[in-house]
Amino acid sequence: MAAKKSVLTVLTGISLLAVTACTTSSNGGDAAPRTERLTTTTTPGDADLDRVTWALPYGEPTTLDPAKIGDYSPQTVEANLCDTLTRMNADFSLSPGLARKVGWTDDHTLVLDLRPDVTFWDGSPMTPQDVVYSLERQRDPRTQALYGNYLAAVTSITATGPNQVTLTTKTYDRTLPKALSTSFGAVNQKAYTEKAGAAYGTAKGGLMCTGPFKLGSWDSGSGIAIERNTSYWDAALKPKAHQVLFRFLTNSNTLTSALLSGEVDGTYELPPGSATALARTGTGAIHLGPSTQNVLLIPTNAASPAADHRRLDALSQIIDRDALIRNVFGGDATPLKSLVPPPTWSGDKAADRFDAAYAALPGATKPDLARAKELALQAGPLPRPLTAAIPAGDQRSLQAMTFIQAAAKKIGIDLDIKQLQPTEMSSLFYDPSVRKNLDLVLTFGYVTMPDPASYVAEMVTPRGIFNWTGYDNAEVTRLLDQARTASDPAASATAYAEAQALFTPTAPAVYLATTHERMFMNKRLSGAPTSFAYMGMPWAAALGGTGK
């Protein structure tokens, strides 16, 4: 039986990372990144702001429906609109959200005690029925939700009081409460969502949530405006900005010009080239924060010649990661040793076990031309060049893929680079038909919650939505399930470590780097978080003016 506890006490802050004022970085050096350069937030801004203009460098969202978002742009916007039952903090810890308390009463019962004072944007109260509906909607096939598997262990979701919802489970599931801090845990108004139907979350259908901002206008091809929710329930996060306008700027040069001129106030995922241009202008500051992002090269389908693990190993052996990090990421990254980077578990009670297991993995080797050629020879001649996909207009991806292309050529592997438009690139991850004529994709992925096992399961278990090549190791699947269902943090970490030792050398992926979050903010603003946790928290509510 699990001890009675609130899961919100399980995760603590990241002690290694200083929560300090902004840090301006040099982005052209060749020294390894120093952890002391990383911060998780910026100095609070004091003054109200009429409007903030923020860039979306990955383009226009296809939807803002919390059940369907799984990419940078929609999550950057939606995190400010739809509150979640638990809340991600800038240091990757969790705190109460729409549920003031979340806790297991036994191994089969997870109780959500809801706040009694929350209203939707239209003024109607949030009810347990809205919460039940929002969660049940995740596993309704008609929703086509991305995260319904988080409910795999749940047998019932019921309103058990005027401000309470209870989830009954087949087994203890340590992922479930953490998932409530992601868009999976967002609460939508039942009546509005049902009326909007399939259009919910689109420019036509709109949204009805409880967040600090409400959806204002959505001008397809141009921008999305969100407006301050003057009746927001959380007094500590009442927005100072009356409006935040998101602009879709996928071209790095256009983005740089807009930031230099002040036409755009800020952006997350600032490209390295833009950072170099902005570093010494005095327009604003570049901030580096910890991140759960991973840069991977992965095959898109089992039939592709790229799925042969010998070819993947050959590519891994020939790529100079230090040079890649220096020349493409401006030094603001570190080599990645497995699927999940360490900040993911930094707030876990068993973080030391996770750290030790990750440290024990073999490090990225220096380029070995002879070994790479041997592996490529074992795989046999390619019937054709391999097609590798990247997002169109993203200079960072183009530079990285060009770097990989040149390295691959040394061992007789020809790569053709195909740039996909934002909508097609986003669809690639969820639509097999888009991947059919591709061989590889350079992914800038990320872990959305402090739970490595759930992320890895999506990539290496038979049920995983990102397991595109049919990877299947029964022992890995068993250990990941054990990590998910163990109520003891140490036991969970141990099971994950054993799985990690098995899948790391065999998973169909080339591990490249884990990047730091790079954010730019105009000097007239402050308050925004600098860590990658912004993807799951109402970051724009923290923005305020500086008077500059």
Image: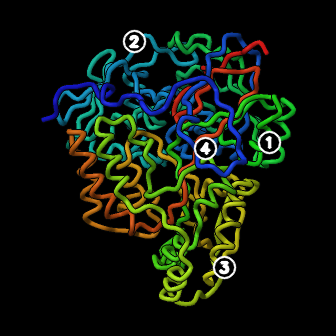
Residue 6 placement: quadrant: top left
Residue type, mark 2 in image? Pro
Residue type, mark 3 in image? Lys
Looking at the picture, does residue 509 appear above or below residue 23? Answer: below
- Distance from label 1 to label 4 (Cα)? 16 Å
| Horizontal side of residue 12 vs 408, given as left or right | left
- Distance from label 3 to label 4 (Cα)? 31 Å
- Distance from label 3 to label 1 (Cα)? 32 Å
Residue type, mark 1 in image? Leu
- Distance from label 4 to label 2 (Cα)? 32 Å
Instruction: Locate residue 515, reporting x and y percent.
Output: 57, 48
The residue labelled by disc 1 is 255
Query: Dot 3 lies on which element?
Result: helix
Instruction: Locate residue 263, reporting x and y percent.
Output: 84, 31
Residue 116 is labelled as 2
- Distance from label 3 to label 2 (Cα)? 62 Å
Residues 66 and 400: in front is 400
